[in-house]
Image: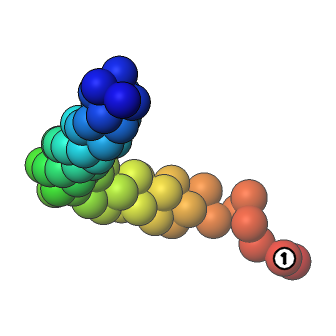
Amino acid sequence: MLVFVATVLLYVFGFVFLYGVIRVGVRHGIEDAEANRPEVLRRRQLTTAENRDFAQENAFLSNPN
């Protein structure tokens, strides 16, 4: 009976521990995504500006005539 109780307690505490580990991992992942967001937006704006400049300089490449 003591072995059964010990097994159940370890089983339950194992799930609680895994829940905590997953929760901490997800929190850190979200924080990393939020920290990198300004850099990603800046890169996207830079790429858009470069594409626009390229299209203006090389309009003959995309002209349907």
Q: Give the residue at mark 1.
A: 64
Residue at horizontal 29 percent and vertical 25 percent from the top: 2
Decide: is 41 above or below 1. below
Between residue 6 and residue 60, name the one nearer to us. 6
Secondary structure type for disc 1: loop
Residue at horizontal 76 percent and vertical 72 percent from the top: 63
Drawn side of residue 64 relative to residue 20, left or right: right
> Around disc 1, counting alpha carbons within 10 Å, would you say few (fewer than 14), some (14 to 19), or many (20 or more)?
few
Q: How many marks?
A: 1
Q: Residue furthest top?
A: 3
The amino acid type found where label 1 is placed reads: Pro
Q: Residue furthest bottom?
A: 65
Quadrant of image for the N terminus: top left
Between residue 58 and residue 9, name the one nearer to us. 9
Quadrant of image for the C terminus: bottom right
Residue 55, x across and y down, in percent:
56, 62
Residue 23, x across and y down, in percent:
23, 49
Drawn side of residue 8 relative to residue 13, left or right: right
Residue at horizontal 63 percent and vertical 65 percent from the top: 59
Residue 22 in view here: no
Residue 48, x across and y down, in percent:
41, 61
Drawn side of residue 21 relative to residue 3, left or right: left
